[in-house]
Amino acid sequence: MTLPAGMVSAVYQNTGILSYQGNPLIEALPPIPERKQLIAGLSETIELRPSEIYLDGQTRVHIISQLLDGFFQPLARHIELESKVSIMLRQGYVGRNLATGDLSAHLQNGYERIKSGDLKAFRFDHVESTAKSLAFIGCSGSGKTSSLNRILATYPQLIHHPEHNFTQIVFLKIDCPHDGSLKSLCHNFFREIDSILGTDYVRRYGEKRHGVETMIALMSQLANTYAIGLLVIDEIQHLSVRASGGAEKMLNFFVTLVNEISVPVVMVGTPKARSVFETDLRSARRGAGFGSILWEPLNQPSPEQSALRTEWGAFTQKLWKYQWLTKAGDTISEELRDLWFDLSQGIMDVVIKLFVLSQIRAVVTGTERITPNIMKAVYHDELKPIHPMMEALRSGDPAKIAQYSDLTIPDVDKKILELSNLLESTKDQIRKSNQYSGNEQAIRLHNMLVDMGYESDLLEPLIQRAFEEHRDLKLKDLMPIILNWYQSSEQAPRAQKKGKSKSVKVKEWHTLDSDDLRFMHSQAANEDEVLDSAHQSGLVFNTDHWLGSGKQV
């Protein structure tokens, strides 16, 4: 039998947990992963080949842009979220065992609800709900949806049980309608099932003049017909803009799903959705008793903390490795890391977009490294729409933060295209200040040697020397000469390693090496900053310190 796309055939494994044993819906799920397995499963890295650093600017823009969707670094919060989802999913199936008849009892109760139009009606009163529920709240851009999607992707969405002639939907994720109506939510539910199973429930149920109560009963029946393990409702904050009656009705529906039908529900939204759950907590019944996770931005380390021992430090350190810049530093300066946090306020989406746009601007300007000046310029020029939200977060005022909780990240793809067009228009000028002065043969030779494993700071000056001293030789003749120099590099004069000194125009000082006094001058706001940078780097002798030490000549 050929299974539909995305469906797997059930393979049952003993979980070792007594309450899960003998339940096909649980035993067909992937094994509960160990922590290391989970981190490996959630991680997504991008291959960075050293030779790519010397590709042309347009190509590097495309490579750098991969970080927007391709970078994911699991943190402690992701492990906690996965654990909650794992428990909710499996516990919800405990009361709906396909092998014992519990699921059939739920289906019979569902039929009774459709027939009577009463969501509280039942035929079998011995069936108890084991479902849990979770409110997952955080600012837009904090990584809620992407994190949840990545965790759900560790499960197959559809499992076929040949022995029982049954199709199981492990999870179903839908968006809450913008109008906040129950009818639109039901349509989204039917539409999502149709999209993964190829059914026509929207036509059968959604297009008919069923009342809301009947549509909810039909939804509930489908939840058990396919043993939906977890229902995820995203963008739940849209409820908060509805009249209280609409929000109350929808909340009662979620309560019914959890308490009466035994389907675990994860409700995902911004802080604007809090009022919905506060209504539930104030009610005498307390509804489904929603647990909650508040997904806050990454925290900035306190002065006494080591940055690398915090989530903020771990996240930025991992991201920092993905640079396709010829003069990129191996480590982040504390000044730049502090600035990065201040501009992004720890919101992961902003952190990554700020990094990507800064890196592309470094390519466009020929600076070829991320500096505080570049990051500030990107924030002020490219990320203006998020400034009010950042100001609210800096204030720490919950009322202001809630006001801007629906953070809208600007159209980054458009910004990248604009920067890419700027790069194309100034290509000739930039190439002059790029590696090897735009010598395509030198760049090609560099890439070949790096791919062969000869990656070193020596490579650039040796290739430059070879092209200066042997202008008429072909690449195949230059390579053994460079390799011979490389292997006897200790004999190479220091001046040759560094390259010949040459005059550089003031407008190109920002393209020089980071320890060059002229580069420091290009980045400083005033002469005092130049001197401070020069003292810190050791380029200027600190006479005050020397005299203060009491040493005699």
Image (spheres, rainbow, N blue to C red):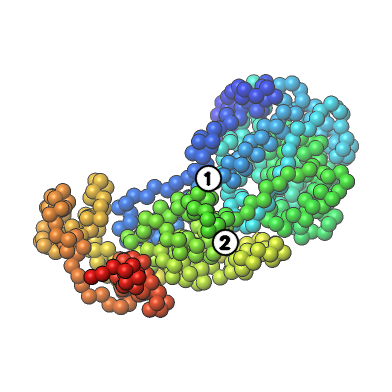
**Residue 266 place in picture, x, y as percent:** 69, 44
For residue 14, say whether it is visible: yes
Question: Quick one: quadrant of the C terminus?
Answer: bottom left
Q: Residue at x 72, y 28 (%)?
A: 94
- Residue denoted by label 2: 345
Comparing 108 with 247, the one in front is 247
Indicate the secondary structure of the residue bearing disc 2. Answer: loop
In the image: residue 128, left or right of residue 323 = right
Indicate the secondary structure of the residue bearing disc 1. Answer: loop
**Residue 179 place in picture, x, y as percent:** 75, 58
Q: Nearer the viewer, mark 2 or mark 1?
A: 2
Q: Earlier in the sequence, mark 2 or mark 1?
A: 1
| Vertical comparison of 202 with 165: above or below | below
In the image: residue 18, left or right of residue 512 = right
Tell me which amino acid carries mark 1. Pro
Mark 2 and mark 1: Cα distance apart in space: 19 Å
- Residue denoted by label 1: 74
Mark 2 and mark 1 residues within 8 Å of each other at the beta carbon = no
| Vertical comparison of 361 with 109: above or below | below
